[in-house]
Image (cartoon, rainbow, N blue to C red):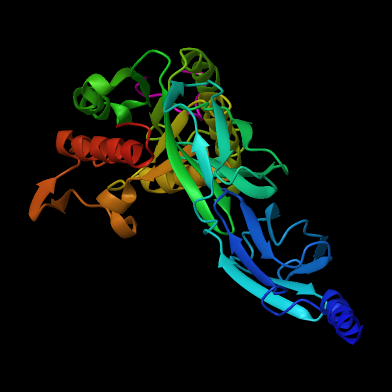
């Protein structure tokens, strides 16, 4: 009887004793095997709640394991703000901690779309989230040829993988596209092809554009078609000979991609009751020139390169040319996305001082005609190169 009582007592102690530390332990491990998500593997006593704290978000979740080893898929998403993630598990008096580092957000987004479209087209672009979880804002910018970039905010909503974007590639040339977040950016280019296959350049103005237009034709080659439309002895201040406002409308109807304008040597006539070359005259000349600039630009479809006059040798031209240049600078103000002024004075008459000759490539060459006003063939060749270089720099001409 005594032996039986002792055996029964030992059995009751064994049944009520707590499990050994080997049987009741707590451990936690994180992994990032699934793109965009953090998973946790929990080793804990089954049936007893485990509190898990995400140190990054401050959120706590309760997990009640059904077995000693539990894997919790998609416990949390990757974060751009904090790459190092720490989690703490608590079960009763036991705690366990794990740390994992997620990928950088710098290359998270991808910009997908066509490499070229016809000028005036509306290409469709896709922003792809490589993490496939969304909830990310970005800034999408387009820089058209010769223009400042224009940006807008975009967002991939939570749970979305892609976002569709559209923009208008109005002007022929290479557009630069940028998708930027605070963590990195994606860049790519898109070429807007000229409607006619080749770039259409209109070279126009008074006698100042002559010879320059010939060099433009010769050097543009198969990349562009250059149409010359020079009207000798005309000017914006003498519409009785040629009304340039109406002429600009007729020329713009031909839909040139680029307009190269050089005019002003024959100006200086009174306008709107004002004699040359005071403030009122400059203001009226600027008004007329600005209207032409906008006509040529056709709402951003064309790029206008307007050449400023280099200083003349003497005579009344010494008053007219600075007044015309001042008016053109005033006219182009605020139109920089469509109009570029080419200051030939910087090359031919720096400081406003007339020169018959300039130094080119270590050699002194004559660049003006005998009248002290027009460029000679060498000067026109240099001016044409300046124009072509501007078109290449602005990604309009390859």
**Rendered-image quadrant of the C terminus:** top left
- Residue found at x 58% / y 65%: 83
Quarter location, residue 12: bottom right
- Residue 78 visible: no
Is residue 79 found left or right of 6 in the rendered image?
A: left
Q: Residue furthest front?
A: 1
Is residue 350 found left or right of 281 in the rendered image?
A: left
- Residue 73 visible: yes
Q: Residue 310: where, in percent of width, then height?
A: 32, 46
- Residue found at x 71% / y 69%: 56
Quarter location, residue 232: top left
Q: Residue 367: where, in percent of width, then height?
A: 17, 43
- Residue found at x 70% / y 74%: 25
Q: Residue 103: where, in percent of width, then height?
A: 52, 58
Residues 151 and 236: in front is 151
- Asked if the stretch drawn in magenta spans residue 241, the answer is yes
The span shown in magenta is 230-242
Task: Provide the major secondary structure of the magenta segment.
Answer: loop
Quarter location, residue 260: top left
Is residue 352 depicted above or below 178 in this figure?
A: below
Is residue 122 depicted above or below 330 in this figure?
A: above
**Rendered-image quadrant of the N terminus:** bottom right
Is residue 194 found left or right of 133 in the rendered image?
A: left
- Residue found at x 59% / y 59%: 182
Residues 292 and 2: in front is 2
Q: How many marks?
A: 0
Residues 313 and 164: in front is 164
- Asked if the stretch drawn in magenta spans residue 342, the answer is no
Residues 177 and 146: in front is 177
Q: Residue 337: where, in percent of width, then height?
A: 53, 40
Is residue 81 depicted above or below 287 in this figure?
A: below
């Amino acid at each position: 009887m005594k032996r039986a009582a002792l055996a029964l007592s030992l059995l009751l102690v064994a049944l009520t004793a707590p499990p050994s530390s080997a049987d009741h332990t707590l451990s936690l491990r994180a992994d990032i095997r699934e793109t965009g998500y953090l998973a946790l593997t929990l080793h804990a006593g089954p049936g007893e709640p485990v509190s898990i704290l995400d140190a990054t978000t401050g959120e706590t979740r309760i997990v009640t394991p059904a077995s000693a080893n539990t894997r919790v898929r998609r416990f949390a998403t990757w974060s751009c703000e904090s790459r190092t993630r720490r989690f703490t598990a608590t079960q009763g008096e036991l705690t366990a901690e794990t740390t994992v580092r997620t990928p950088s957000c710098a290359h998270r987004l991808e910009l997908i779309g066509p490499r070229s479209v016809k000028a005036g087209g509306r290409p469709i672009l896709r922003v792809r989230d490589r993490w496939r979880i969304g909830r990310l804002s970005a800034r999408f910018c387009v820089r058209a040829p010769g223009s400042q970039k224009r940006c807008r905010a975009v967002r991939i909503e939570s749970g979305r993988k892609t976002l569709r974007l559209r923009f208008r590639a109005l002007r022929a040339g290479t557009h630069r596209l940028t998708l930027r977040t605070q963590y990195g950016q994606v860049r790519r280019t898109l070429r807007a092809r000229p409607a006619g296959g080749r770039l259409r350049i209109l070279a126009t103005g008074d006698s100042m554009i002559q010879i320059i237009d010939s060099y433009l034709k010769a050097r543009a080659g198969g990349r562009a078609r250059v149409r010359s439309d020079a009207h000798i002895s005309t000017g914006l201040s003498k519409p009785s000979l040629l009304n340039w406002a109406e002429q600009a409308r007729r020329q713009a109807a031909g839909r040139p991609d680029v307009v190269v304008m050089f005019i002003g040597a024959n100006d200086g006539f009174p306008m709107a009751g004002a004699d040359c070359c005071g403030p009122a005259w400059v203001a009226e000349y600027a008004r007329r020139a600005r209207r032409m600039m906008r006509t040529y630009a056709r709402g951003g479809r064309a790029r206008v390169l307007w050449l400023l006059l280099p200083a003349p040798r003497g005579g009344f031209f010494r008053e007219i040319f600075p007044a015309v240049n001042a008016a053109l600078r005033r006219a182009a103000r605020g139109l920089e996305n469509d109009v570029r002024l080419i200051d030939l004075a910087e090359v031919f008459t720096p400081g406003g001082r007339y020169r018959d000759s300039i130094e080119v490539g270590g050699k002194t060459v004559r660049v003006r005609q005998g009248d002290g006003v027009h460029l000679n063939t060498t000067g026109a060749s240099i001016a044409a190169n300046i124009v072509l270089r501007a078109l290449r720099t602005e990604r309009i001409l390859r």
